[in-house]
Image (spheres, rainbow, N blue to C red):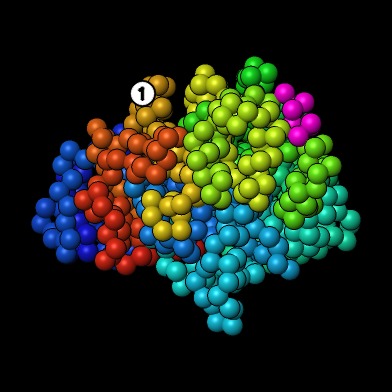
Amino acid sequence: MDFDFLFRGATVIDGSGAKAFTADVGVLGDRIAAVGDLAAAQGREERDAHGLWLVPGLIDAHTHSDAFLLLEPMCPSKLAQGVTTEIGGQCGGSAAPRLNGARLPSDWEAQTYPARPGRPIAPGPNWDTVADFRECLEAARPATNLVLFAGHNTIRKGVMGDAPRAATEAETRGMVRVLEQALDEGAWGLTTGLVYHPGVHSRPEEVEALVAACAKRGGMYATHMRSEGERLLEAIDEVLTLARTTGVRTQISHLKTSGRANWGKVETALARIEGARAEGFWIHSDRYPYLSSGTDLDIVLPDWASAGGNAAILARLDDPADRARIVADLDASGRDPASIMVGGTWSAETRHCSGKTVAALMEGWGMGFGETVVRILRADRSRTGAFFFGMCEPNLLRILAQPWVMAGSDASLRAPWGPLGRDWPHPRAYGTHPRFFRLLTERLGLAPEAAIHRMTGLPAHAFGIPRRGLIREGYYADLVLLDPQTWRDAADYAHPHRFAQGVDTVLVNGSPVLMGGQLNPSAPRRGRFLERA
């Protein structure tokens, strides 16, 4: 039998957690056709895999690549780590359904996307529904697969704008209808970002109505909870109540204990989740292997100042009286400026701030905390990225030790070039997966097979992704050949655009999009919008 691609003599770690074995693996079309002794066979392309590991394509359980797949469809930062499938639409902010001109996150909103029939070339998204976005994705032909969730904040903005209040019953029904259409058009479920505007204003009954509608159609629920710090335990209780009430399959996003005062809550938090799992509820989590989170700097603003969306924020920052009040509130907030680092910036005035802490900028400018933050936000028109160092390593390792926690980067794809190369991303965008593996094996003592399972078979099982996450005959040929001795992250906060090292070959649906450690642009890009089973 001849194959399109043949790996010879690989150490196969099949994603199930079972012991590694040596085998040849043959690929025909988009499927794994044979696993075993294939010495008598030939491949149109072959790779000598002796001394290397062949693992299933990694599944990034929490990403924000949605719109960026249209801009950089080769997905270089993901392929270099071995990622072949991304779970997008997270934290309540999905690319679609984007109705009534709902504004997306600033890093998506600022880009110009490929032309669509009947839509002029202009900055900003040019799609509306999930079906529209799927058409854009199919035209772009990304190299990786996408599982897309529908974001609560995006849906809410489409129904009621940025209104900083609870939804009415009629508005909640409108959101449910939009969600149902999104699910019918291919969304896998609902995500929430309950610390972000406008979702922060939602009442539990609004979220429950949406989650119940999602569960009724067989969708999942993934949540950036209402708190990951002071009210962490209450936020976990809210999530577990939803799971118990609706029966929805649930993913707790980037589980953490943020802020020194909350580090002692980790055991109680884990015990509550374990209790719900012991009752039979389908609950998993993901985590990135870093001690800083990453989001927009304007999250530090007091709630009154950030209500109503970006236009309202800018109006307050530009108004002298409101600005003075914001400065005073920030100075009284008790935040540690040394624990906040500026990430991506958008103006000549702030470009030098990337990679520096707010404390260092305060010293250089001779300003207080509030004045420094406001100066940056005004210059960048409230689009600045930031990293927040509020976690501790013992808790990180304690969370990663849980067998129901998988790797999620909480990052969009990046490239050191083009429209995505001008940003200053969190190093997790380039390094999450090899770093996750190293922490599990070198710090926690897990066997390589168990660690790879957490990055392949476990997320495929948790999200219900059919025929992926394992090396089995008949499964889709998402495969990664890597050198276990050199598979490491290289990006850091000072040099975020550094590719991970050690991945030799990546196949996505049978296409070798990375070969010999280099992107292979001559290979067809066969990434797909994945359908729910």
Tell me what residue is drawn at x 22 percent, y 59 percent.
5
What is the residue that sits farthest to the left in this orientation?
A: 40
Q: Which residues are drawn in magenta?
A: 327-334
Element at label 1: helix
Which residue is the site of mark 1?
442
| Residue 388, horizontal then vertical, whole percent | 59, 32
Residue at the spot 70% in from the left edge and 34% down from the top edge? 371
Mark 1: give few (<14), some (14-19) or many (20+) Cα within 10 Å: few
Q: Residue 23: x, y in percent? A: 20, 45
Name the dominant secondary structure of the magenta segment. helix
Left or right for 357, reference 249? left
Foreground of the two, 188 or 296? 296
Q: Where is 293 relative to 510, above or below? A: above
Q: Is residue 287 left or right of residue 305?
A: left
Quarter of the rendering containing residue 28: bottom left
Q: Would residue 160 be visible to someone looking at this image?
A: yes
Q: Residue at x 28, y 44 (%)?
A: 503
The amino acid type of the residue labelled 1 equals Glu
Query: In the image, residue 451 lies at what x, y percent?
Result: 39, 33
